[in-house]
Amino acid sequence: MSAPRDFWLSCGHHLLDRDAVGNLLLTDEFIKAYLARPELVPPPEACLAERKLHVALLSDPKVAVAASQLAAIADADARENWQMMIAWRDHLVRHRTLEAAYLDIVRNNIKFPHVLIGQLVQVILRNLLDDCDDVFVLRAAEMFFRPQKLMVREGSVIAIDEEREAMLPSQLRSPLVELLGLPASVEVDTLNDAIAGSYRQRSDGFDIALDLTVGQRGLVALGDAVRRWLRHLLAIDVIVEPLAEVHNAGLSWYVGLSSEATRIGDAIWYGGELDEVMRARLVGLFRLIFREPADMIEKVRGEPVYLLVATGPDGVLRLKPQNLVTGLPIRHQEAVN
């Protein structure tokens, strides 16, 4: 019997349609999945206005909702939830594809809750990774939408889903245990060939760690996830390869894929020395090469771009895939609409 192909079922990708080139089209069924969330299902004590709105949207998820209908909801928390939900739904409806909706958010810095944007990133990734046979890439892609706690086990740097890590004993949670010379162990499965076949059926539990040690498959897989993300969203073809050393990289152009990574990149750019703590927080360095130099702005055409990945002071890696959209020296706009 062949291994199951599906993964990340909870993101609702099966509720969406796709256009001729594989981009995601919003459906009533996808919107209804939001309406089933506990934050939006009216409790027994909900007012008539809230209950009527919920019923109307279940009947027609794209029906116009007036501001006065939202203002009539008695409970302040419920009213705020519904205002955000309708704003989010209206944003998705305004765009032909979910990819275009995401790009608009990123390029125009539209403020929506991180949880909603993360869900959108996940379903886009689920779509573009549908033909991916490498579960290491699938696990690395989780970092695009789920924060990771970085820990050390026997000299290896291990990324554990932050929510999963919270279930571990507190003494195991130091992000700099190796730097400080403290012992550490992690009681959680780390992805390897022996358990790779179980990844898809376990994928919605986010309970498998990934080894991000230089020279191991995790960083290579993250680079491939970046490559696929850029090809799908921006229609550019790149090579992304992990590097072992930061001091050998002349940063003609760089993109920090987390807030701390941007700070480290700035320090290198301006000729500063990285202290021991900054080096400990730097998880990955990648060289990105455009296969078609004409896709780049003339100023750095033909030059490599460097991507930096680093944890914050709390040892959590919060990847910012939007920086790939806004930070690369791309000459043209993407083909997604």
Image (cartoon, helix red, strand yellow):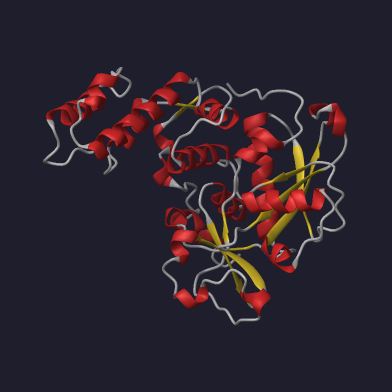
Question: In the image, what residue occupies the spot 44% across and 25% down?
Answer: 91
**Which is more toward the observer, 65 or 132?**
65
**Among the 4 quarters of the image, the one containing residue 135:** bottom right
For the question of whether residue 118 can be seen, the reply is yes
**Which is more toward the observer, 89 or 310?**
310
> How far across and down, in percent of the image, does residue 53 sit?
21, 26
Question: With 150 as the anchor, is 82 left or right in this view?
Answer: left
> How far across and down, in percent of the image, does residue 127 sit?
53, 37
For the question of whether residue 29 can be seen, the reply is no
The number of callouts visible is: 0
Question: With 31 as the anchor, is 104 left or right in this view?
Answer: right
Name the quarter where the C terminus is drawn: top right
Question: In the image, what residue occupies the spot 55% across and 41% down?
Answer: 125
Q: Is residue 250 above or below residue 278?
A: above
Question: In the image, what residue occupies the spot 45% across and 63% down?
Answer: 164
> How far across and down, in percent of the image, does residue 60 sit?
27, 21
> How far across and down, in percent of the image, does residue 2 sit?
50, 53
Question: In the image, what residue occupies the spot 41% across and 68% down?
Answer: 167
**Which is more toward the observer, 57 or 263?**
263
**Among the 4 quarters of the image, the one containing residue 34:** top left
